[in-house]
Amino acid sequence: MKHKKLYSLLALLTMFALVLSACGANNNVEPTAVEPEETEPPVDVPEPTEPPEEPTPEPEPGIGSMEHPIKVLFVPSVDTEFMIASGDAIEQALNDATGLYFEVSVPTSYAATIEEMCASPTDTIGFIPAMGYALANELCGVEPALASVRRGWNVYWTQFISRRDSGIDTLMDLDGKSWGIPSTTSTSGYLYPSALFADMGITPSDQVETGGHPETVRAVYLGEVDFGTTYFSAPLLPGDAEGEKWEMGDDPDVPDDVVESCAANEDGNLFCSGYRVLDARSSIHEELPDVVQIVQIVGLTIEIPNDTMSFSPDFPEDLKQQIIDAVVAYVQSEACLETLCSEKFYDWTGAAPIFDENFDGIRIMMEAQGITLENIGE
């Protein structure tokens, strides 16, 4: 019995030792690392935003601003160099009167002036003659505003000129002779004499476009053409201060007995013993001091509406009247005598309103002569 009990105790101790050994072994084993499950990297989702605003376009500079000056065009009918030199003074005077900015230029021809007015319909002013206005109105709707006044006259004439030694002394003597014209778009230089030639049956041998009224006088003076057609403004008579005025029907030239006395006075004005010459010959007398002694007036046409200040077709209505007022006031000023009112320029002494219907006679004459936009100058 004692042996059985001993065997039982030994077995129990052995089992207990095995249990202790197993526990110790487990305490010395490194724990197995658990690999993390693979996951997709997080995706950044942008916060919702407002669509970008379109950039605000810069506003167009206003017409009459420094960045967008108003164009002022003068046809090159007289002393072009003097006209160009006068531009800054005219710009400044109009700016002072209106607060607007202007840019004066003298295009190369009547036609170029009309083309520019139609090409710049919103911002252009043109000083153009009657036929030029009628053509521009037909072409793109140019509108008249003012007409010039010269010493009380709101009309002028074509004068036919020749050398005094040419033997061309009457209008009928012009038949078969070479004809110098300022431009085919000139009212006095081309339209009115063309109408008179048609009425009288006069056919010039050829015509030469000279580029302006002074240039036509020069061509006649030099004998480059037999006769020419230019503008005629009534002369001032010796008794003008006492009310003696030249009237239609009077001799357009100075009396023969004073021709040799013709010369510029100390102010540069052309006088012949008290007669002040104001026609196209006066625009070139500084270059040709004996122009009256060499070139005579053969005759005149009927009266012609004076030249205009006109607006391009879409010119802003709210600017027109202040510009009209400024031009009228400028023409009445002493400063204008150095520019627009000079005999070297357009010789304006005043300005008055004029309307489209005032040019119906011009249109009738153009139609009678078959003059259109398409064939002008042919």
Image (cartoon, rainbow, N blue to C red):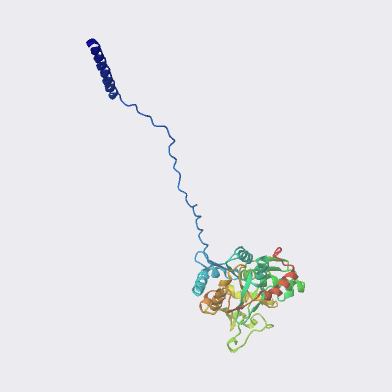
| Left or right, residue 35 beside residue 193 | left
Q: Quadrant of residue 45?
A: top left
> Where in the figure is residue 249, as x and y percent of width and height?
69, 83
For the residue pair 57 and 26, the one nearer the viewer reads as 26
Q: Is residue 8 visible?
A: yes
> Where in the figure is residue 262, as x and y percent of width and height?
59, 79
The residue lying at 61 percent from left, 63 percent from top is: 119
The residue lying at 59 percent from left, 89 percent from top is: 242
In the rendered image, the quadrant that contains the N terminus is top left
| Left or right, residue 139 beside residue 99 | right
Q: Is residue 167 visible?
A: no
The residue lying at 63 percent from left, 79 percent from top is: 154
Q: Quadrant of residue 164?
A: bottom right
In the rendered image, the quadrant that contains the C terminus is bottom right
> Where in the figure is residue 96, as x and y percent of width and height?
49, 74
For the residue pair 79 and 63, the one nearer the viewer reads as 63
For the residue pair 19 and 371, the one nearer the viewer reads as 19
